[in-house]
Image: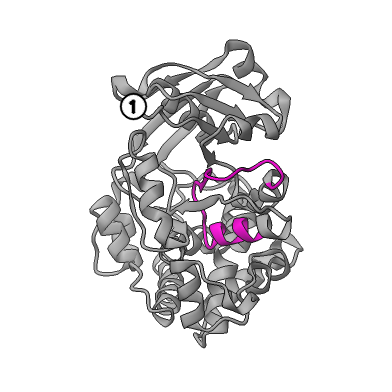
Amino acid sequence: MTTPPMRYTVVGAGNGGKAMAAHLALKGFAVTLYNRTPQNVEAVRMRKGIDLDGPDPALRGFGRLAEVTSDLKTALDHADIVMVVVPSSAHADLARAAAPYLRDGQIVVLHPGRTLGALEFAKALRDRGCTADVTVAETETFIYASRSDGPAQARIFRVKEAVPLAALPATRTAAVLQALEPAYPQFIDGISILHTGLNNMGAIFHPALTILNAGRIEATHGNFQFYIDGVTPAVARVLEVLDRERVTVAAALGIRARTALEWLKLAYNAEGADLNEAIHNQSGYFGIMAPSSLNHRYIYEDVPMSLVPIAALGQRYGVSVRGMDAIIRLACIIHRTDYWRRGRTLDKLGIERLSVGELTEFVMRGRRQWEE
């Protein structure tokens, strides 16, 4: 007997969510698109799908959707696999809202998890009393470079060739990859959510580069090339310190994280004697403009959801993270908020008392003896 194809629900109808929903539909999967605000998906609902454009024929056409809804119960009822494509700051709230409706055997994938997103999502489900046997997984980065071209239109510029993915616990990663393989053979084993989270390069590049260019962003409304003009030798030295701290935090957890230089070589084949040179040798950065204001996800999302948990792990396991702490504190001042309190701190994740061995055992095999 042939196994029926997986049914997908895409949560989030922004740039990435619409692109993913349309692409999955073009591949022949039954796709439900969910957005909590009905007016944001009204055009898609009326047309019953999304026009997708891209650089090759497989990325062009009308993706007819099975359902478009703003009712979360309906969206989850129709899903074998739930693809979460919303800002990471919404992960916990979404988990709490979804907890009553999830059922045994479903897979939830965060695109991406940022840092420890799967852990936050799974804990929020437990705290809300969800007893369903649901597998939560996360990707290291978003698989698409995409944008929204209109209320029912999306464009994909590029599909990444290899994207690490890890489940919580890691013993379930193989099953998630197998379930996703017909739609996304690009996903590969990310080892664990500690690996995907600590290889989060946006945590290093985005907040610091935005904050260190704060005056220029406010004066020009972002009218300069973010990476080319915004990265100077002094700025690059700060990025190198943050990157060294991230790699050292990973090492304290027994993880060999990629350095920023290694990542630029792997992702873009860009090399240099130092980070400043390598960034300027990355031709893909040319033309990328800076944020138009400081009220941008590079601060309000990447600081609490990416930088805070990495710094918190460093503080817990004896790694100096003074550079990260400085950037976090500057972000707090600029936005007049406490990102240490609002962010993914270890107590919120329920791991503040774990040794390295206990944390590793939990993310690899799911054992939580400390709660028993």
Q: Going 32% across and 56% down the picture, which residue do you hit? A: 280
Q: What range of the chain is rendered magenta? A: 99-123
Q: Is mark 1 on a helix, strand or loop?
A: loop
Quadrant containing the C terminus is: bottom right
**Residue 114, above or below 225:** below
Judge by depth and name the residue closer to the eye, 130 or 38. 130
Q: Is residue 332 left or right of residue 8?
A: right
Q: Is 65 within the magenta?
A: no
Q: Going 63% across and 62% down the picture, which residue do you hit? A: 304
Of all residues, the one furthest to the bottom in this rendering is: 318
- Mark 1 highlights which residue? 1
Is residue 165 visible in the rendered structure shown here? no
Judge by depth and name the residue closer to the eye, 94 or 42. 94
Quadrant containing the N terminus is: top left
Of all residues, the one furthest to the front in this rendering is: 1
Q: Going 66% across and 49% down the picture, which residue do you hit? A: 95
Q: Is residue 49 left or right of residue 157?
A: right
Q: Where is residue 56 in the image (x, y as percent from the top left)?
A: 29, 23
**Residue 320, above or below 127:** below
